[in-house]
Image: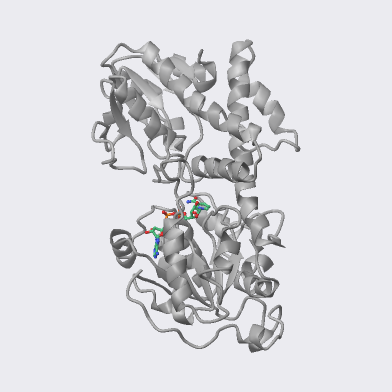
């Protein structure tokens, strides 16, 4: 963050005076209607979304970003993340983006939304978090609430509460939003999970008041109504995030296993998974087989969850298997392509983002696949509606149009589930490709439609080992 500033008067006068924050504290008329002074640290997917949404709710929000290139784009009115609707909404609300950390001194709530990536050993790298909280610890006024929205190992909030942030109130409030629908998820979450010192609960309720009441929000409300605030210990809140992501990743790995087994025994994976979807105990989401899960959260969070379990002396067998299955799933898909095409063939790769609706390529299975195919001697030419370049891999060519990526391809490979790929004109595509192989890593295309267009189709569930 930028230059340092001096600290101001204590905040949360109501807490200090021992009065209730829950309704009508500090003379405000309705729960959630008092403008809280908020500083958000980190203007990535979580931070920028939180900042814009909290400003929409009427709070006075400053968002601090230390990455000059990213900040410049925000200051220029752009959204460097390409998150649908975010730039537009940002244009309608008063939120200040800055490199200066000064606003922390007068903030009642400081939200930490910095990255917690995986280090080279698969452990969470907390250097951004530790640097940000050290600065907050030096600047924030006594009693300010520090909300940790980043995904952090269990015990991190307690550690900060007992060290750098001793004067402050540390709350774990993990974020569950999905990239590509961040605004919808932020305004209409399934639940808000938070935990920390008991006196911090009411200010958190006040911060999210309109969301908790489902009042005057843009977008499509959930059928179930406004979300509950689940208040628990900071450790439980931290674990709740890993538990959810660990479970979802395991569900996907399990579904991929079912699809592989279905093929091996001559059953139809779609029919089997379709029947499971109607069982409310299973749920209809996350039942589509694919070439493996990835993204900025699942790989790092599952590895971190394993480390957390190991630290507690617990052997998390199921999660270990889910991670291993995921690596195998991608290898299996890559091997099938390598077996089918002669060496030095050209692959037209459709998709680079880790999922549709985002330009995020962190831990993307599509990128991992591209790298593996290139290492194996294949020439890979890619197209993704959300990713115009990928300088990290100079051997990978990225084209501006689907047809350009597939022109003269010996095989077309779908790696990201963009609707554009599901809807593409296969007959027209076949006219430009050299070969007739179509590998569908997301099971987007019906085999019959592919055959009609003259493609030899390989769905992700129909591949041998
Ligand atoms: N992306 C998601 O879908 C998602 C969903 C839920 C939770 N999370 C978690 O939220 C956290 C943030 O994720 P993200 O995807 O938004 O990360 P990100 O990398 O896109 O954004 C983090 C931002 O923080 C900035 N930053 C780091 N240190 C800073 C400092 N001291 N001062 C100012 N800015 C600083 C970085 O420059 C970066 O722009 C991670 O812990 C992640 O696991 C992410």
Question: Which quadrant holds residue 95?
Answer: bottom left
Q: Residue at x 37, y 65 (%)?
A: 65
> Is residue 395 depicted above or below 190 in this figure?
above
Question: Which quadrant holds residue 398?
Answer: top left
Count of numbered badges drawn on the protein: 0
Residue 423 in sight from this viewpoint: no
Spot occupied by residue 48 in the image (x, y as percentages of width and height):
44, 62
Q: Quadrant of the N terminus?
A: bottom left
Q: Residue at x 42, y 57 (%)?
A: 127
Q: Residue at x 64, y 36 (%)?
A: 316
Q: Is residue 376 left or right of residue 321?
A: left
Spot occupied by residue 442 in the image (x, y as percentages of width and height):
49, 29
Residue 285 in sight from this viewpoint: yes
Spot occupied by residue 279 in the image (x, y as percentages of width and height):
75, 33
Spot occupied by residue 136 in the image (x, y as percentages of width and height):
46, 72
Ligand 1, seen in the image, is in the quarter at bottom left
179, 395: nearer the viewer: 395
401, 256: nearer the viewer: 256
Question: Which quadrant holds residue 366?
Answer: top left
User: Coloured how?
Assistant: one colour
> Is residue 14 depicted above or below 419 in this figure?
below
């Amino acid at each position: 963050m930028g230059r340092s500033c001096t600290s101001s008067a204590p905040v949360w006068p109501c807490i200090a005076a021992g009065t209730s924050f829950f309704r009508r504290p500090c003379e405000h008329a309705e729960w959630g209607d008092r403008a809280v002074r908020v500083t958000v640290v980190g203007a990535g997917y979580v931070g920028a979304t939180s900042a814009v949404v909290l400003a929409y709710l009427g709070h006075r929000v400053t968002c601090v970003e230390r990455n000059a290139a990213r900040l410049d784009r925000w200051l220029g009115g752009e959204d460097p993340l390409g998150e649908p609707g975010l730039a537009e909404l940002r244009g309608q609300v008063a939120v200040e983006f800055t490199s200066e950390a000064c606003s922390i001194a007068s903030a009642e709530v400081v939200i930490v939304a910095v990255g917690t990536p995986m280090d080279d050993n698969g452990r969470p790298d907390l250097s951004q978090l530790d640097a940000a909280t050290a600065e907050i610890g030096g600047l924030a006024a006594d009693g300010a609430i520090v909300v940790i929205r980043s995904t952090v190992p269990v015990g991190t909030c307690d550690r900060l509460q007992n060290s750098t942030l001793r004067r402050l109130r540390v709350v774990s409030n993990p974020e569950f939003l999905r990239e590509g629908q961040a605004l919808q998820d932020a305004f209409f979450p399934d639940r808000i999970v938070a935990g920390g010192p008991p006196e911090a609960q009411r200010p958190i309720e006040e911060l999210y008041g309109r969301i908790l009441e489902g009042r005057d929000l843009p977008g499509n409300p959930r059928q179930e109504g406004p979300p509950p605030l689940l208040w628990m210990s900071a450790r439980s809140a931290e674990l709740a995030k890993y538990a959810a992501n660990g479970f979802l990743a395991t569900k996907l790995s399990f579904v991929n296993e079912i699809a592989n087994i279905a093929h091996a025994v001559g059953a139809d994976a779609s029919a089997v998974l379709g029947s499971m979807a109607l069982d409310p105990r299973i749920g209809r989401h996350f039942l589509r087989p694919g070439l493996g899960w990835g993204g900025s959260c699942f790989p790092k969070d599952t590895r971190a969850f394993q480390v957390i379990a190991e630290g507690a002396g617990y052997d998390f067998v199921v999660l270990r298997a889910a991670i291993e299955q995921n690596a195998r799933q991608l290898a299996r898909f890559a091997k099938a392509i390598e077996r089918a095409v002669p060496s030095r063939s050209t692959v037209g790769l459709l998709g680079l983002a880790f999922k549709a609706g985002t330009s995020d390529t962190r831990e993307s299975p599509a990128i991992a696949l591209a790298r593996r195919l290139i290492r194996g001697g294949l020439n890979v030419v890619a197209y993704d509606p959300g990713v115009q370049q990928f300088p990290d891999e100079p051997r990978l060519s990225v084209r501006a149009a689907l047809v350009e990526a597939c022109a003269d391809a010996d095989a077309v490979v779908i790696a990201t589930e963009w609707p554009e790929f599901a809807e593409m004109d296969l007959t027209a595509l076949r006219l430009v490709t050299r070969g007739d192989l179509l590998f569908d890593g997301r099971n987007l295309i019906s085999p019959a439609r592919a055959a009609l267009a003259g493609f030899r189709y390989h769905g992700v569930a129909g591949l041998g080992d």
